[in-house]
Amino acid sequence: MKKLNKLTTTAILTAAALVVFVIEAQIPAFTSIPGIKLGLSNVFTLFTLYAVGVPWALALLLIRVFLGGLLTGQAAAILYSLAGGLLAFGAMLLGRKLLPEKQLWVVSVFGAIFHNIGQLAAAVAVTGTSEILYYLPILLISGILTGAFTGLCAQLVLRRLRASRFLP
Amino acid sequence: MGKTLLTFCLCLALLGTLCACSSADQKSTSEIFAMDTAMSLTAYGKNGEAGLAAAGQEIERIDALLSVGNADSDIARLDSGETDTVSEETAALLTRALAVSRLTDGAYDCTVYPLVSAWGFFSGDYRVPEDAEIRALLQNVGWQKVALDGTTVSMPDGMELDLGGIGKGYASAQAVKALRDAGVTSAIVSLGGNVSALGKKPDGTDWSVAIQDPDDTSTYFGLLQVADKCVITSGGYQRYFEQDGKTYWHILDPSTGYPADSGLISATVVSTDDVLADGLSTAVFVMGLDKATALWRENTDLFDMILMTADRGVYITSGLSGAFSTNESYEVIEP
Amino acid sequence: MKTRTWILIFVGLLAVCLAAWLLLPGLLSKGSAVGIYQDGKLLKTVDLSAVTGTTTFTVTGNAGENVIEISPGSICVRSAGCPDQTCVKHGPLKTGGTPIICLPNRLVIKWLDDTDTEYDAMTGT
């Protein structure tokens, strides 16, 4: 993909990620940690990672974290989102190197798992209470399920696009 | 053209969903240490933080203004004889203190400071003064001897004022006002146990205020539902010491100089006027069930009360029936 | 690794998490976080259900020292230098009860999660 195409593609996907993020934020929080969500917008980060490139995906993630936090009026959550997002990104980067594209969904699940771990770790560090870890089991459950779902979506779309020569 | 319009509308719709969702339930709290006690403030809504900051500043300002322990305060300078003029705010508060003193026939008296001091309730060096000492100190107790002309105060030498008995009430009233001015519509503050509520809870229900049980301060004997009112309790159990098998508490009867012994162990006053309620709760404790009932019957619009006698009898005034729940049996005082 | 293996791994993980989520409430009571404040500032938080032995935490103020005793599921003031001894008399912090307060030392010990008490405020001291 040419650089301009990468730029515009990433821009559109970032906007889409923000929309999904904000809509997802309307679901009432079920933990006392600000910013814990399903993580559906991660599908865009994942897709960009495979279809466009690493730095673009990172840019998308960072913009989504900061603007998303501001748009949802939860600036406090930015810290946790960042911790989770960056940890997840690292995990997905590694997964992408080690696993074939047809197991993209596995990479996504790991991304989701590490996203939650990152958020919880940040929350524990900030509040100094370990009580928060109580939420780890339920978060992992939702993480694995939404991770698999978004991973499958990204995987199927990518396969189609590659098959139709839209993408290399 | 149609497509552009459609896209535009879609963008507007998206923009609409982008606006942060309801923040009306956002809870802000602050803990303050002022007026020698722990204070806890809770405010809801997006103006909560700003409101709490303003309320906190007000409380600290009033603390500095009224504190007898602070040598620069109006009251301290008045009591030491350094000056006989006070600020307009202090004068206004003094006027109210004298009015409550008059209303309760001296059961609340803003001139008892030297007496309470002699018992050691301020310093912590508790002692039981001799009869003679108490009689001597009583010479200088008597709100009627205080004259206020504008901002000039005249009182006999040796007399000392202390507005602490209504100070927290004034602070809670001002704190609530600061919150209201900041745009808060739902808040509750507890200034060392003086509770004052602004509006209702975010879900529209009344605030639940527990009345501390005098015999077991870790729990309560009743729950009161209030909105836009204050709830203030006075009880000997709040500050006392024991000597030679007898218990002496900090609420003194200004007419005898000894701890009030009217048969009540807890007196709670509920009102929209925090200053009045603060002074009245002390006065009612001193007056006892009968005198307090008489006072209430002449002022049913001004306040309501919940009383507990030494034998754990609970009495509430009719204005509160329907808002009070308890496991104890209680009597309703009718007008 | 084969895709099937991954599926098995994740399903296994899901099962473990589900079990943990169902069993954990029994082991960990929700309102067990306590905050120790001085002058309105939070000095320390303690999760009483995670405490294994008995330790002490000393707070110093204008009226001497408050020796706070922290044991599994309980916290109280063991001794204090203030004349009133109200904080010592209070005994252990109880659920739904009042905070432990030492006024001379501006010390407050209370539950951090007091959203499930039956009342919003309590009068008295």
Image: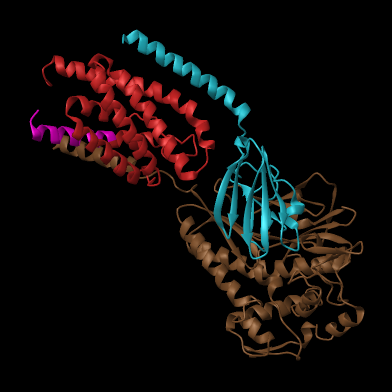
Chain colours: A red, B brown, C cyan
Residue B261 versus residue B249: which sits nearer the camera? Answer: B249
Residue A22 versus residue B10: which sits nearer the camera? Answer: A22
Residue A159 in which image quadrant: top left
Question: Could you tell me which quadrant the C terminus of chain B lies in?
Answer: bottom right
- x 23%, y 22%: residue: A97
Taking the image as shown, residue B11 lies to the left or right of residue B118, namely left
Q: Position of residue A31 (x, y in %)?
A: 49, 36
Q: Position of residue A28 (x, y in %)?
A: 46, 36
Work out whether C83 lies above or below B327: below
What stretch of residues is rendered in magenta?
Answer: A1-17
**Residue A10 highlighted magenta (yes or no):** yes
Q: Position of residue B16 (x, y in %)?
A: 32, 42
- x 62%, y 59%: residue: C60
Work out whether C32 lies above or below B321: above
Residue A18 in which image quadrant: top left
- x 31%, y 33%: residue: A20
- x 54%, y 22%: residue: C20
Q: Position of residue B221 (x, y in %)?
A: 78, 49
Tell me if residue C106 can be seen. no
**Residue B59 highlighted magenta (yes or no):** no
Residue B101 in which image quadrant: bottom right
